[in-house]
């Protein structure tokens, strides 16, 4: 008697009942090994694992690989019901050497018994099945994407997922596919949510009035408007329920479905290597935002709009301008009260500029951060931090005296010069500086020419010294 363990896999992509899939794969395995006196004494069957995952990342398949190393394992060979479900791409060439090393035969129906390590035909055949498996998965993806594109464009069908904030799902009748309809599958459509749709309108209106995304989020939190994850926690369990965030407001402002059209293909799944130094670990999927020209719109409106298309387009235009604009920090406001460090202090916890404030006739610097956003961002930040100027200035004066001490003056000036050169400049300022330096170089050339022509050396030397001093100052300014 030969003791076998059965290995198999089924995933959600296969659209099969896991028990039925396991049963027919095991039946194929038993049919193969029974004439040789084989008996299945255990199994390693993965459910819900895509074939694209390497064996090391499939729970049961990885357990089998670990058991191969055990000299006291309770089986003599491994049998697979269908190689296309177990091997994807070049996985066979990466896995089979382990079976060969630990002297565990691998039986496959397609070769009529154990895979022969010395047979080029067996190796070629298993490689073909791996390539066929990959091609099959790609064909499924292409067919599904083509179908979803057609259903979105032609019918405007809701294709699943969470409804956008401001809408709710309502029943739209039985599924048009008779088989799915018999299983109780139904279609759904978007309908305005009377509680949250006005909030979406408010967000668009405030943005068009000039309020920033952060200010809108703070205003909604202050007004006590529940954020999406608090309003519907069952649908947003992975989100923070503390407050409105900038990203939530931005996502609402960028969602074209508020115009009444169904939109698909805003994101795509992209597979990237988990470890570039170990490609055997395979890939992981991540969502990537597609460019708007690849979005698929329904030909007509499929649900009631919350904003008009022209309003949505204007918001996108303004957001694009803000994205491409050069960010400049706001200058401190004019005030009659003196602040020695006005506009220079930053909070060490959130890195925002601290504001000047007078209390009991003394200047303070404060950083105010809403408690809701402290929770959202996970900061250990009090709601308000106050720093008295007269507590700070003595320490600052002592530090300045130390770095500008005569013994360290050259080192400090070199550091200041390097910092000034490394700092960013506006293009216009840099161009003006280059023009000024070029003019100085032309003056120096004229002075040297005058000296060669017989001009008074003392006078010309003074001109040259002054020009060189100005050139040095311009270069470091």
Image (cartoon, rainbow, N blue to C red):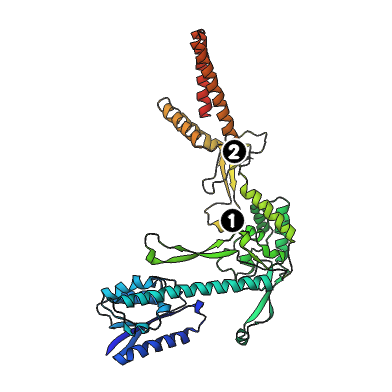
Which residue lies at the image location 33% right of the left edge and 87% below the top edge?
Answer: 41
Q: Position of residue 368 (x, y in %)?
A: 60, 48
Q: Position of residue 1 (x, y in %)?
A: 27, 90
Residue to which mark 1 is pinned: 373
Residue to which mark 2 is pinned: 343
Q: Quadrant of residue 91?
A: bottom left
Which residue lies at the image location 56% right of the left edge and 55% below the top edge?
Answer: 374
Which residue lies at the image location 68% right of the left edge and 61% below the top edge?
Answer: 224
Label 1 to label 2, Cα distance in Å? 23 Å
Q: How many residues crowd around disc 2 within 10 Å: few (fewer than 14), some, or many (20 or more)?
A: some
Q: Is residue 324 above or below residue 395?
A: below
From the viewer's perspective, tell me whether residue 142 is left or right of residue 262: left
Instruction: Give the structural element (helix, strand or loop) at label 2.
Output: loop
Dot label at residue 381: none
Q: Nearer the viewer, residue 438 or 411?
A: 438
Q: Quadrant of residue 424?
A: top right
């Amino acid at each position: 008697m030969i003791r076998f363990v059965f290995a198999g896999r089924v995933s959600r992509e296969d659209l099969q009942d896991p028990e039925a899939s396991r049963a027919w794969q095991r039946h194929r395995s038993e049919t193969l090994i029974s004439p040789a006196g084989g008996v299945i004494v255990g199994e390693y069957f993965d459910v819900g694992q895509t074939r694209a995952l390497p064996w090391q990342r499939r729970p049961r398949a990885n357990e089998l690989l670990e058991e191969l190393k055990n000299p006291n394992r309770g089986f003599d060979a491994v049998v697979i019901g269908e190689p296309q479900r177990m091997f994807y791409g070049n996985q066979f060439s990466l896995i089979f050497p382990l079976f060969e090393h630990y002297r565990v035969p691998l039986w496959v129906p397609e070769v009529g018994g154990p895979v022969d390590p010395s047979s080029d035909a067996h190796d070629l055949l298993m490689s073909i099945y791996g390539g066929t498996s990959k091609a099959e998965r790609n064909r499924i993806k292409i067919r599904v994407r083509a179908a979803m594109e057609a259903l979105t464009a032609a019918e405007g069908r809701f294709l699943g997922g969470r409804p956008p904030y401001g809408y709710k799902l309502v029943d739209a009748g039985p599924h048009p596919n008779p088989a799915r309809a018999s299983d109780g599958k139904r279609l759904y459509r978007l309908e305005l949510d009377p509680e949250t749709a006005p909030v979406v309108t408010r967000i668009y209106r405030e943005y068009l009035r000039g309020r920033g995304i952060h200010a809108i989020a703070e205003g909604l939190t202050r007004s006590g408007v529940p954020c999406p994850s608090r309003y519907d926690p069952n649908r947003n369990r992975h989100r923070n329920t503390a407050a409105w965030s900038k990203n939530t407001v931005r996502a609402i402002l960028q969602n074209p479905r508020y115009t009444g059209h169904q939109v698909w293909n805003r994101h795509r799944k992209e597979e990237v290597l988990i470890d570039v130094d170990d490609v055997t670990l395979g890939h992981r999927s991540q969502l990537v935002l597609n460019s708007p020209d690849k979005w698929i719109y329904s030909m007509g409106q499929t649900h009631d709009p919350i904003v008009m298309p022209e309003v949505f387009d204007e918001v996108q235009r303004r957001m694009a301008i803000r994205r491409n604009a050069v960010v400049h920090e706001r200058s401190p406001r004019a005030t009659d009260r003196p602040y020695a460090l006005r506009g220079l202090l930053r909070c060490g916890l959130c890195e925002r500029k601290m504001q000047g404030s007078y209390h009991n006739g003394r200047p303070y610097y404060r950083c105010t951060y809403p408690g809701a956003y402290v929770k959202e961002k996970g900061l250990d930040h009090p709601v308000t931090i106050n720093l008295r100027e007269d507590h700070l200035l003595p320490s600052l004066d002592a530090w300045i005296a130390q770095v500008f001490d005569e013994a360290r003056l050259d080192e400090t000036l070199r550091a200041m010069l390097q910092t000034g050169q490394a700092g960013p400049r506006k293009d216009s300022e840099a161009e003006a500086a280059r023009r000024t330096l070029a003019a100085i170089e032309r003056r120096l050339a004229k002075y040297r020419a005058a000296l060669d022509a017989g001009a008074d050396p003392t006078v010309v030397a003074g001109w040259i010294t002054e020009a060189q001093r100005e050139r040095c100052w311009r270069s470091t300014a």
